[in-house]
Amino acid sequence: MIQIKPIAADRLPALLQRMPKAELHMHIEGSLEPELMFALAKRNGLSVPYPDVESLRQAYVFNNLQEFLDIYHQGTLVLRTEQDFYDMTWAYLKRAAADNVRHTEIFFDTQTHTGHGLNTDVVINGLHRACVDAQQQLGLSASLILCFLRHLSEVEAFEALEQALPLRDKLVGIGLASSELGHPPEKFAKVFAKARALGFRLVAHAGEEGPPAYIWSALDILKVERIDHGVQAMKDPALVARLRQDKIPLTVCPRSNLKLRVFPTLAQHNLGAMLEAGLMATVNSDDPAYFGGYMNDNFTQTFAALGLTAQQAYQLACNSFEASFIDASAKQIFQNQLIETFETFE
Ligand SMILES: [Zn+2]
């Protein structure tokens, strides 16, 4: 473990901005800003059920995950063409690059869009083309993780997987998202076994609103490599020991947890406690357009609220590369850049 020299609190935001980092938990449909939503609606001859951008943004107040999912689904209705998916993804990638995100693994789903009559290839080809352009034009590497919607059936997840297989080369992994409570990971045991046999990397949302038992079953039944959120793990000491021992990454999303009332305030968030418990936590934005913050907003606000240190900033950024699905040599390059940033920061 590299020892990082202490940095004054007022210099931390600049350091958090400058440090290279990876984002591992961001749903592309959740990056659709109201301005772009209105522009896409206009282009497609559709209407948004709000008079203007400001009144739409003001509707982004939620009491729980389900209230968010309802309005989020409404927003996806403006996405109709491959170019729409490209434009949405490109907007996110430019924003991420501005926050010094060097690598991102983007969540998306196809079931929302096939439910609106679109074909799977419209979604995946639009997203993938933006990822290719990001590497060439922004120096940002980006890959795609297809998430099944857990409020739908396992049979429907199998259909989504089947439809995506002709585009297998454009995907790195499979995830599990949407309404957690009442939809435990084991509901998707068979389709995750199939995805594993096909060579996909596996992740799942667990322990956001759901109990520690969902994290256990994501690990032991779905056999995922990362847990998305996982903040409820801290309620179960045996689970904390397991996560620490097996170095299971947790993709924590502080502003999401605040906006969906998983924690009443950022000062009560358990990110600092997770790091102190030796867990491989990372910081991510989840659905930045809806939760009012991209990567660096999540870092700076959480660090300010919890009084976290430069050493912890280094740890979180280092974890983000370590937890990613890039190969060992790419990890080493990013981690060397990270060390250099900390050594040269004044
Ligand atoms: Zn999420």
Image (tube, rainbow, N blue to C red):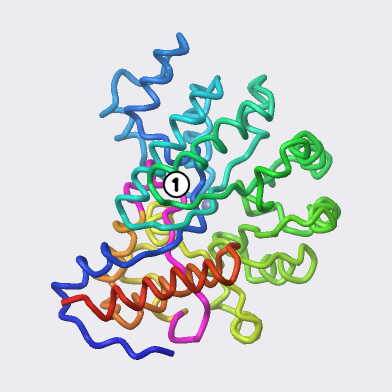
| Residue 202 on the magenta span | no
Q: Which residue is found at the position 22% from the left and 86% from the top?
A: 6
Callout 1 environment at 10 Å: few (<14), some (14 to 19), or many (20+)? many
For label 1, the SS is loop
Answer above or below: position of 97 versus 89: below
Label tally: 1
Residue 38 percent location from the top left of the image: 36, 21
Q: Is mark 1 within 8 Å of ligand 1?
A: yes
Q: Which residue is found at the position 63% from the left and 32% from the top?
A: 112
Three-letter code for the amino acid on which mark 1 is drawn: Asp
Residue 171 percent location from the top left of the image: 66, 46
**Left/right of residue 245 with respect to residue 83 in the rendered view:** right
262 or 164: nearer the eye?
164
264 or 81: nearer the eye?
81
Answer above or below: position of 214 versus 99: below
Q: Which residue is found at the position 36% from the left and 39% from the top?
A: 60
Residue 82 percent location from the top left of the image: 55, 24
Answer above or below: position of 86 versus 62: above
What range is drawn magenta here? 275-294
Q: Which residue is found at the position 45% from the left and 61% from the top?
A: 22
Q: Judge whether residue 187 can be spotted in this image.
A: no
**Quadrant of the rendered image containing residue 327:** bottom right
Quarter of the rendering occupied by the N terminus: bottom left
**Quadrant of the rendered image containing residue 224:** bottom right
The residue furthest top is 45
**Left/right of residue 140 with respect to residue 179 in the rendered view:** left
**Left/right of residue 229 with respect to residue 283 in the rendered view:** right
**Quadrant of the rendered image containing residue 346:** bottom left
Check disc 1 and report the residue beneath it: 287
